[in-house]
Every structure is written in structure tokens, then in C-alpha cells.
Amino acid sequence: MREKWARRIALLTGLLVLLLALTFAFIQNPTETPVITESREQSPSTKQQEFIGIDLKRIEAGQQIYKQQTCARCHSIAGQGNPHNSLDGVGARRTALELRDWIIGADALQGELPAYATKLKQRYRELPSDDLDALVIYMQSLRF
């Protein structure tokens, strides 16, 4: 009789441990809706275009400048690049003027950016005006 109870207790203990492990795994790794990065890499979605009303060619030009200037060394978009400084949704958080200031490391941001970041960003002041505008427009398209 004791042997039967010992088996039952061992079985119940094993099930309890398994249940707790599954619960812990679920809490630590919640299921998320997968992010499709391919469409963002190619061009902004139709929803983004309608929402911001910006010329698609200017957005694509800004995306190319982002790649040419290797901005992904310090920033990420849709999980691509340095994850410490994500730009996802930056177009919803900042105005065009604020985005331009952040891109070029404007003097007004002296306390908000680390000194090394300000120094790195100041090289973007030398970008042609059209390129800088296209980069700002691309950043504005990153609303989601």
C-alpha cells in the first residue's frame, strides 16, 4: 500500500513540476505577433504611406541614405541593427525638426546625447540638404 502511495505522490510531484515549468516558460516568453521585417526593408507599407502622406520615392531615398551612412551601427529598425537604439516608432514620437536635430547632433541637444554620440552625429551636418531631408522623411515614415 505504501508503495502505491509513493508512486502516486511521485507522479503528482512530477506533474506539478512540469506544470510549474510550463507556466514559468510562458511567463518568461510570451507569444508575440511576429514582425514582418521584409516589407519594411523593401519599402514602407501602404498604411504608412496613407498615414503620413509622404512621397514613396523620398522615403526609399532616405532608406538608402540610412544604409549608406551605416546608421545601423548605432540604431535598429524592425530588429535590424544595434538593438540598443531602436528607431521603431520614432516618426510618431518626434517632429521633422526634432528628427533633423537628432540626426545632426544639434547644439540644442547637448545634455541629452552622450558626448561621443554628439560628435559622431555632427558629421551628418555635411550631408547635402536633399539627403538630409530624405533621411528625415524616412524617419517620419517609421511610425509603427
Image (cartoon, helix red, strand yellow):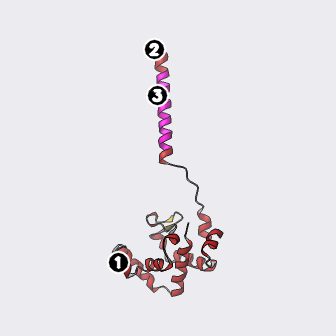
Q: Amino acid at mark 3?
A: Thr
Q: Of helix, strand and loop, which mostly describes the magenta segment?
A: helix
**Do the numbered discs 3 and 2 sit on residues whose CB atoms are within 8 Å?**
no
101 to the left or right of 138: left
Relative vertical location of residue 70 with respect to residue 2 in this rendering, above or below: below
Magenta stretch, residue numbers? 8-25
Residue 27 in picture, x, y percent from top left: 48, 45
Label 2 element class: helix
Based on the picture, tell me whether residue 17 belongs to the magenta stretch: yes
Residue 133 in picture, x, y percent from top left: 53, 83
Based on the picture, tell me whether residue 46 belongs to the magenta stretch: no
Seen from this angle, which residue lies furthest top? 1
Relative vertical location of residue 14 with respect to residue 107 in this rendering, above or below: above
Q: Tell which circle, 3 or 1, labels the residue nearer the N-terminal end.
A: 3
Q: Which residue is mark 2?
A: 2
Residue 106 in picture, x, y percent from top left: 40, 81
Q: Nearer the viewer, residue 86 or 47?
A: 47
Label 3 element class: helix
On residue 110, the disc is 1
Q: Which residue is mark 3?
A: 13
On residue 136, the disc is none
Distance CA(mark 3)–CA(mark 1): 59 Å
Q: Amino acid at mark 1?
A: Gln
